[in-house]
Image: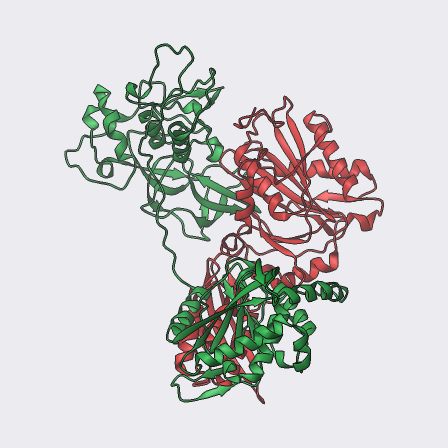
Chain colours: A red, B green
């Protein structure tokens, strides 16, 4: 048995490969499975192919900035989840029309090109007329121009994984709207995504479904690893099979991981606030580190807010999470201890609402 | 074993490094190690330049994205040192040595080169340096079989400190299931194993093989006539508790709550509680629930409580007022913006339903639904959270009967509703019947509100709820 679990488990097989598929569509649960396999499985004798699909979610790379990469406002409105994966690379949109493939190997056997060529081989075997090829950026292009797959990888001490997407029948309009950031004035060294035109395989050939594609790729993997074409289903909430998985799932959902791991960035922008019959330009400069406001400068016209209240606001914002919900509850609670003056209250609310829009 | 490289130092310095203690009693067992007793690791450690190893795919340079350690931190073999990125691959670099970080060669976003030094680590020179391959062997500290084990062809991973703990407690590392990375045995695993040994009540089974890890043999009582293996008496051994206090700065919303509650403290509160018989209201709600559902709205008891409160405020408007900072003026608010305390992940949030005085019970239910779904999604807006004039807190949904709620400035009153309980009560004929009873606890600002006002308001509110038909008469 390759795992030190007290009872004999299905992981131990004599073969050189294992194909597993998740029964869950929860992006966090599925990412947790990747973590688990990476941390706990001995891949020396047995490589693993993991197949998974997610309900609508945006997945950013390990070192990316979600504010820079996607329209967080729209995500919240549409109830689309945001996840940060542990591998590098850029931002992708997942829905059930997109399939994810993860190739687990030992660190020494880490070889992305081979994996992508396997996928192309499987696609061509399925539909020989498909014009699909791998680029040197590890993308797969359809008709030489449309990206149908993006790649990312994670390397640890002894094991590694390479995962990629494959667009079967994803919602392209949602994809393009969520992956467009409305936030201006951001400056950061976070890994930027490279936008590309995308197309679904379904558009090229309507007879292709996610199931057919998953099956074809699994078949090719089985052939190349000389194993049975058998896909084992796993449930990412099975703590007996995957001890410790629920903690991994929880960690991936924490604010500290999703937002707090954003590399330090700064915002330099101007709020144009319409107040009574004039427009007030307010320059805002903020530094955000670990997802929290480290430095906050708001350039208001003199005395527009009483200095006491202004200082209170800036002091409270400093150290707070750069999060609209946190700031909303913070500023509305603070308002309770401000002088009860309608003018002051409306100015305070106006300024705060504009600040919150930045998040 | 590199022990011979260490000079014995006469100065005994207490260092934070946990590896110093390894040179303790265990060292005395070996004659050739006796010279090293209480060696100061700081002055005698060797600085090793840990080079960035090959990433694969012919990659020669990477970007440093995050440091997990800083200069001065102590690291164990296999601990993560940093995260680097190259061409869509994120790589976790782990330490090959036990020691102390002395220098980081790169800052965040710098380009690091494969084969060039990444960090300088000062290693305790008595420790072996792990070889290039991923072999996990560390030099045996003892002739006894505990420390260096081979189980089914796998070598056990455990830091020297963990091995020592196992050895001290006569535990075979092969008995322990490691829960750390790569099945590494962690200190917690040893402690859990120990806890099970000394605290567990073992079933009387002849197959029980567990030998108590007692240092003193008298701990095992042996009845001479009993042939079956006796259940070992648990030896109480002080288990090292490794929990640590954790300090966190008070920021953001919490900071604001500190301010608000400190201000609330300045308000002289008085409390007034009563019991409300909701038997009739429970029945009414049962009848109306499906009607509301047909309109797509969930109907709870709150809309009734809120509307009744507003009707009460029409008669006692001072409860819907605000006292200015200097206590010079009382402002009677025209709108009844009744706040509903909500428990969210962040803590206590109080959105309010605006202008209840012109809303029907159904309108209030609709608005509550909207606020509740926004609240649980963490998407309440500033207008939802400001402008409240009076608050109700339904703590009963979580539990409790009586409470002493704290007034939320700039308001002057608040009500806490306990849970609804089925209790026996006497009716007009002296018969016992099943009543649905809820307790309400009011707090009010005694500077401008007196007990009588609060009591009368409460009685009116209570009468509306105990006899819902009476609400119809006064509905606006």
Residue shown at the point (60%, 35%) measured from the top left: A104
Which of the pair B45/A11 is nearer the observer?
A11
Tell me the quarter of the picture where residue A278 sits: bottom right
On the question of residue A78 being in view, the answer is yes
A30 lies left or right of A124? left
A177 lies left or right of A240? right
Residue shown at the point (52%, 81%) measured from the top left: B320
Q: Where is residue A254 in the image (x, y as percent from the top left)?
A: 52, 52
Q: Position of residue A289 (x, y in %)?
A: 45, 60
Q: Position of residue B260 (x, y in %)?
A: 42, 71
The C terminus of chain B, quarter of image: bottom right
Residue B57 vertical placement versus A278 (above, below):
above
B14 lies left or right of B270? left
User: Total marks drawn?
Assistant: 0
User: Please, which residue is most extreme toward the front here?
Assistant: B429
Residue A205 vertical placement versus A181 (above, below):
above
A101 lies left or right of B315? right
Residue shown at the point (45%, 18%) measured from the top left: B208
User: Please, which residue is most extreme toward the left here?
Assistant: B10
Q: Position of residue A243 (x, y in %)?
A: 54, 35
On the question of residue A315 being in view, the answer is no
Tell me the quarter of the picture where residue B312 sits: bottom right
The N terminus of chain B, quarter of image: top left
Which of the pair A352/B246 is nearer the observer?
B246
Tell me the quarter of the picture where residue A31 sits: top right
């Amino acid at each position: 048995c390759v795992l030190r679990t007290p009872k004999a488990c299905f992981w131990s097989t004599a073969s050189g490969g294992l194909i597993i598929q998740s029964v869950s569509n929860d992006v966090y649960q599925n990412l947790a499975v990747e973590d688990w396999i990476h941390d706990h499985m001995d891949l020396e004798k047995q490589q693993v192919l993991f197949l998974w699909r997610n309900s609508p979610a945006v997945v950013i790379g390990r070192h990316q900035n979600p504010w820079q990469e996607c329209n967080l406002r729209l995500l919240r409105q549409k109830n689309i989840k945001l996840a940060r994966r542990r591998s590098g690379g850029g931002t992708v949109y997942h829905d059930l029309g997109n399939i994810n493939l993860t190739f687990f190997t030992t660190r020494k056997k880490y070889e992305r090109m081979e994996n992508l060529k396997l996928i192309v081989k499987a696609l061509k075997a399925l539909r020989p007329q498909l014009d699909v090829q791998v680029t040197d950026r590890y993308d797969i292009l359809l008709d030489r121009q449309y990206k149908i797959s993006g790649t990312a990888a994670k390397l640890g001490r002894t094991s590694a994984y390479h995962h990629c997407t494959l667009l079967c029948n994803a919602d392209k309009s949602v994809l393009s709207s969520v992956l467009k950031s409305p936030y201006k004035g951001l400056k950061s060294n976070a890994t930027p995504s490279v936008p590309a035109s995308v197309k679904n395989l379904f558009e090229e050939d309507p007879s292709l479904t996610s199931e057919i594609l998953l099956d074809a790729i699994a078949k090719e993997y089985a052939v190349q690893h000389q194993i049975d074409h058998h896909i084992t289903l796993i449930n990412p909430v099975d703590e007996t099979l995957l001890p410790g998985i629920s903690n991994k799932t929880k960690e991936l959902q924490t604010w500290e991981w999703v937002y707090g791991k954003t590399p330090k960035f700064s915002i330099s922008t101007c709020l144009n606030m319409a107040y009574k019959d004039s427009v007030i330009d307010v320059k805002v400069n903020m530094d955000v580190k670990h997802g929290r406001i480290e430095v906050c400068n708001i350039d208001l016209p003199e005395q527009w807010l009483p200095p006491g209240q202004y200082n209170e606001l800036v002091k409270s914002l400093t150290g707070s999470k750069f999060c609209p919900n946190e700031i909303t509850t913070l500023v509305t609670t603070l308002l309770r201890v401000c002088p009860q003056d309608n003018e002051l209250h409306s100015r305070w609310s106006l300024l705060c609402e504009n600040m919150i829009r930045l998040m | 074993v590199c022990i011979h490289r260490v000079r014995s130092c006469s100065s005994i310095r207490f260092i934070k490094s946990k590896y110093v203690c390894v040179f303790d009693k265990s060292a005395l067992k070996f004659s050739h190690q006796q010279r090293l007793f209480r060696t100061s690791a700081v002055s005698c450690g060797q600085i090793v330049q840990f080079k960035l190893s090959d990433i694969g795919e012919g990659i020669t340079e990477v970007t440093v994205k995050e440091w997990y350690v800083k200069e001065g931190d102590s690291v164990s073999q296999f601990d993560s040192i940093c995260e680097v990125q190259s061409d869509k691959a994120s790589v976790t670099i782990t330490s090959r040595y036990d020691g102390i970080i002395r220098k980081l060669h790169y800052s965040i976003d710098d380009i690091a080169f494969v084969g060039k030094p990444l960090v300088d680590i000062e290693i305790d020179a008595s420790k072996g340096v792990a070889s290039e391959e991923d072999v996990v062997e560390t030099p045996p500290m003892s002739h006894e079989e505990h420390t260096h084990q081979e189980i089914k062809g796998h070598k056990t991973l455990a830091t020297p400190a963990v091995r020592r703990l196992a050895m001290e407690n006569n535990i075979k590392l092969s008995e322990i299931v490691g829960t750390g990375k790569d099945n590494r045995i962690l200190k917690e695993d040893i402690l859990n194993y120990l806890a099970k040994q000394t605290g567990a009540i073992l079933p009387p089974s002849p197959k029980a093989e567990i030998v108590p890890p007692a240092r003193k043999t008298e701990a095992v009582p042996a009845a001479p006539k009993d042939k079956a293996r006796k259940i070992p008496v648990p030896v109480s051994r002080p288990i090292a508790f490794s929990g640590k206090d954790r300090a966190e700065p008070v920021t953001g919303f919490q900071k604001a709550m500190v301010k608000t509650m400190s201000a609330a403290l300045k308000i002289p509160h008085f409390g007034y509680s009563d019991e409300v018989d909701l038997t009739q209201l429970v029945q009414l709600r049962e009848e109306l629930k499906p009607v509301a559902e047909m309109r797509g709205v969930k109907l709870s008891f709150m809309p009734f409580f809120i509307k009744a409160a507003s009707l009460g405020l029409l008669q006692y408007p001072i409860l819907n007022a605000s006292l200015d900072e200097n206590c010079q003026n009382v402002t009677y608010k025209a709108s009844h913006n009744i706040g509903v305390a909500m428990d969210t992940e962040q803590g206590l949030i109080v959105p309010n339903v605006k202008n209840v005085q012109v809303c029907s019970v159904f309108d209030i239910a609709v608005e509550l639904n909207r606020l509740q779904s926004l609240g649980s999604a963490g998407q309440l807006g500033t207008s939802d959270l400001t402008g409240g004039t009076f608050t109700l807190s339904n703590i009963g949904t979580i539990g409790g009967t009586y409470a002493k709620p704290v007034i939320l400035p700039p308001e002057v009153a608040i009500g806490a509703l306990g849970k609804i309980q089925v209790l026996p009560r006497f009716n007009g004929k002296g018969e016992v019947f099943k009543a649905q009873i809820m307790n309400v606890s009011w707090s009010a600002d005694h500077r401008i509100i007196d007990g009588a006002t609060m009591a009368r308001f409460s009685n009116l509110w209570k009468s509306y709820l105990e006899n819902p038909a009476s609400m119809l008469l006064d509905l606006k």
